[in-house]
């Protein structure tokens, strides 16, 4: 027996012991890297990570930042602790990147006038991180891919349309094309560029093809998408000739939320929707999978698998969008356009299994599919940063990385991030909460704010959504005994038989009669009043109670952020937290309000806020348990900037609420729990800012939930987690 044979058999035996066949392999996020860390010292500006690639050894990620005009590097030698590798400034917009041995090829958009498109292919030496030279491309590039054998690269020249000219109608010349360039040790021979014309093929604007994305199979065949033209082309790289082409076709959709109206309603229909593919990937050498983003008149919200002749082997229809909605990631404000917008895609073989990954730009999720040769198997959905654009698989290290283009730092939102995931034995860290269909109907959800535990059943909580869903205020039932937790029912809040509007529900409490008390945060500029509402078990509003005039005299839009109850019967008292200081509050102090429904008496105490070095600090939840009121206090900061996400408590027996307008007691508080480790470690993402719900179930178990803002300027991630407290009443 040779040494190599013995080594192979030993490896097989070791693998069989270390990873039994029954062990589940799942992807989980292991790191989150804000690409702003690659900015020069002292510089702070918006950044983006769009298309991403990896070096041959899998230890370095390279991404394009077109808005910032840079190519960035990330050292992932230790994938769980990525390090900034610096960046290279590029003259123009580097919009795509592909590793080619020791070099990185970048496409650079130099276009100043869309009627005169211009661009270059840049060659970067990875070791020195220097731009060595460029090739003129004679047009506006959009993507570059290197062949699996490294002998050539394919470049899509889009020569994109002006969306403001004639409402973006095609045709708008000059036409796009495909370029093929020979490579030697990663270096392109600029004088070897072959131009492949692709006019006259598509049914839509055949004279004006707009190539979008390329991919190359093991046989050197190039797949090219013409997004606006709704077409797919296959090209032989050796002859630089089109060998086949076909329309991406249309699809009829049912169960669509196609209206941006402040509600989640998956009952609509769309017919003959052009797929309009963005990314394309080969599955082997005979099948193609496309992401149907749409950009012109289409976008079928899913993906499609074709054979090489254009025969549809599988179409996702609404299955992916519905699953993303069950995860709370449906972007309602994009409903009327293209829903979740599948855009980017990756495909790779991990441990002998072919996977492909579909990136939802607007849902900010990565769908992981196993390729079965027939109907693909959706195995999980991964949380991403905001607007994933590109992804790269590193099967040799069991890694996947995504590049997320949106940077919302200027508005206090998350920065652009590169996320790193690992395929390993274990359990799925995400999602932490999903919805369960009821009577065959999908429950869409998001923007969870207040929480309260059921009085009779262990493990059952109720949650409310806020004003993101303006015409669909709701009460959700959550079963915490399921893993992940499940939303098992929804009750819509109504007024006189119609959906209750002008509400911003931020808190919920049991009323002891089978119904609930709800706290609404007001905003006079939006004609939303501050107040509390009593609803029955059907969600019908039975009483509306506004805040007293003496309190409203100092109002702010940062109003009620929670409600809870103490006592019962005639002694029932509602306690409410006001988020931030109002005009009559001393700086650094906010009010805790009390209201007795029987006597209709209002009173208050003052609560001391922690100091904020940046942003602001306020309250976001209040819940009674035992002898204390538990209060969530947080800053409004996200990611590395977040410093305060804590739970405090105030002794009920020491509270002496007084009449509003007079002298109010400043209560003492006790720190109970720091949520920052929970928020950092649960899924290894950046710290989410809006921790807005906290409650105890009947047995005394504590739970927290974050508000995902209805996936509006947000990653859509919701963390619903059990909380272990180290105090007793």
Image: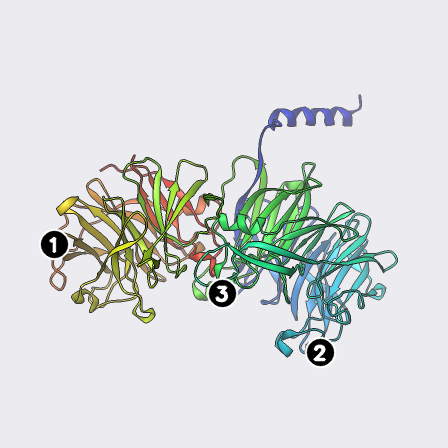
* Residue at horizontal 66 percent and vertical 77 percent from the top: 112
The tally of labels here is 3
Where the C terminus falls, by quadrant? top left
Most foreground residue, 530 or 113: 530
Disc 1 designates what residue? 599
Q: CA distance from mark 3 to mark 1?
A: 59 Å
Q: CA distance from mark 1 to mark 2?
A: 74 Å
Point out the residue furthest to the top here: 1
Most foreground residue, 470 or 192: 470
Disc 3 designates what residue? 42
* Residue at horizontal 46 percent and vertical 66 percent from the top: 410
Image coords of residue 262 (percent x, y)? 43, 61
Sequence-first tag of 1 and 2: 2
- The colour scheme used to paint the residues is rainbow
Q: Is residue 500 left or right of residue 206?
A: left
Image coords of residue 535 (percent x, y)? 28, 52
Where the N terminus falls, by quadrant? top right
* Residue at horizontal 25 percent and vertical 57 percent from the top: 532
Disc 2 designates what residue? 115
Sequence-first tag of 2 and 3: 3
The secondary element bearing badge 3 is classed as loop
The secondary element bearing badge 1 is classed as loop
Q: Are marks 1 and 2 in contact (CB under 8 Å)?
A: no
* Residue at horizontal 59 percent and vertical 67 percent from the top: 67
Q: Is residue 597 left or right of residue 305?
A: left
Crowd around label 3: few <14 · some 14–19 · many ≥20 (10 Å): few
């Amino acid at each position: 027996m040779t040494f190599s044979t013995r080594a192979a058999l030993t490896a097989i035996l070791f693998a069989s012991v270390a990873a039994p066949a029954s062990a589940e392999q799942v992807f989980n996020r292991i790191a989150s890297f804000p690409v702003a860390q690659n900015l020069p010292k002292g510089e702070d500006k918006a950044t983006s990570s769009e298309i991403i690639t990896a070096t041959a050894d899998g230890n370095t990620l390279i991404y394009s930042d077109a808005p910032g005009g840079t190519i960035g590097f990330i050292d992932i030698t230790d994938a769980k602790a990525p390090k900034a590798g610096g960046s290279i400034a590029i003259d123009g917009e580097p919009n795509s990147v592909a590793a080619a041995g020791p070099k990185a090829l970048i496409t650079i958009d130099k276009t100043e006038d869309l009627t005169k498109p211009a661009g270059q292919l840049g060659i970067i030496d990875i070791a020195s991180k220097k731009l060595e030279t460029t090739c003129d491309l004679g047009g506006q590039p959009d993507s570059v891919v290197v062949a699996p054998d490294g002998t050539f690269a394919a470049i899509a020249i889009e020569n994109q349309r002006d969306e403001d000219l004639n409402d973006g109608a095609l045709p708008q010349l000059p036409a796009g094309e495909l370029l093929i360039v020979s490579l030697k040790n990663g270096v392109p021979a600029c004088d070897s560029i072959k131009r492949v014309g692709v006019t006259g093929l598509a049914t839509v604007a055949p004279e004006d093809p707009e190539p979008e994305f390329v991919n190359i199979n093991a046989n050197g065949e190039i797949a090219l998408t013409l997004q606006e033209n709704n077409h797919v082309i296959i090209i032989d790289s050796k002859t630089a000739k089109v060998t086949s082409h076909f329309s991406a076709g249309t699809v009829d959709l049912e169960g669509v939320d196609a209206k941006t109206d402040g509600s989640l309603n998956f009952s609509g229909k769309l017919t003959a929707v052009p797929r309009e593919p963005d990314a394309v990937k080969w599955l082997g050498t005979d099948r193609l999978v496309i992401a149907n983003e749409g950009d012109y008149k289409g976008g079928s919200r899913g993906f499609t698998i074709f054979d090489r002749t254009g025969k549809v082997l599988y179409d996702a229809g609404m299955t992916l969008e519905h699953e993303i909605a069950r995860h709370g990631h449906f972007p309602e404000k994009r409903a009327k356009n293209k829903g979740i917008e599948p855009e980017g895609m990756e495909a790779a073989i991990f441990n002998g299994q072919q996977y492909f990954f579909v990136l939802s730009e607007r849902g900010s999720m990565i769908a992981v599919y196993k390729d079965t040769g027939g109907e693909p198997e959706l195995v999980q959905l991964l949380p991403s940063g905001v607007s994933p654009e590109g992804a790269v698989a590193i099967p040799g290290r069991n890694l996947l990385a995504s590049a997320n283009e949106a940077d919302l730092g200027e508005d206090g939102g998350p920065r652009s991030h590169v996320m790193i995931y690992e395929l390993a034995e274990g359990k799925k860290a995400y999602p932490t909460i999903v919805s369960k269909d009821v009577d065959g109907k999908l429950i869409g959800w998001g923007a969870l704010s207040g929480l309260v535990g059921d009085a009779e059943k262990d493990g059952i909580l109720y949650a409310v959504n806020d004003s993101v869903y303006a015409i669909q205020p709701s009460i959700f039932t959550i079963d915490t005994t399921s893993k992940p937790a499940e939303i098992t029912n929804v009750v819509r809040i109504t007024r006189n038989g119609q959906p209750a509007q002008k509400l911003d529900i931020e808190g919920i409490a049991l009323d002891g009669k089978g119904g609930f008390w709800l706290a609404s945060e007001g905003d006079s500029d939006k004609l939303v009043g501050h107040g509390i509402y009593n609803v029955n078990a059907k969600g019908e509003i039975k009483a509306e109670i506004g805040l007293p005039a003496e309190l409203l005299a100092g109002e702010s839009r940062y109003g009620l952020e929670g409600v809870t109850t103490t006592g019962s019967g005639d002694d029932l008292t509602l306690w409410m937290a006001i988020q931030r200081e109002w005009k009559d509050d001393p700086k650094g102090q906010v009010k805790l309000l009390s209201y007795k429904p029987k006597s209709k008496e209002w009173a208050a105490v003052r609560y001391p806020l922690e100091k904020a070095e940046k942003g602001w600090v306020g309250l976001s939840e209040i819940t009674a348990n035992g002898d204390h009121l538990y209060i969530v206090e947080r800053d409004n900061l996200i990611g590395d900037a977040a410093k305060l996400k804590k739970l405090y408590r105030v002794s009920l027996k020491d509270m002496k609420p007084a009449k509003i307008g007079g002298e109010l007691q400043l209560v003492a508080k006790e720190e109970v729990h720091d949520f920052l480790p929970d928020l950092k470690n649960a899924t290894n993402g950046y710290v989410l800012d809006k921790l807005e719900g906290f409650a105890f179930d009947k047995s005394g178990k504590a739970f927290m939930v974050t508000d995902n803002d209805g996936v509006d300027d947000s990653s859509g991630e919701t963390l619903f987690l059990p909380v272990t407290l180290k105090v007793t009443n």
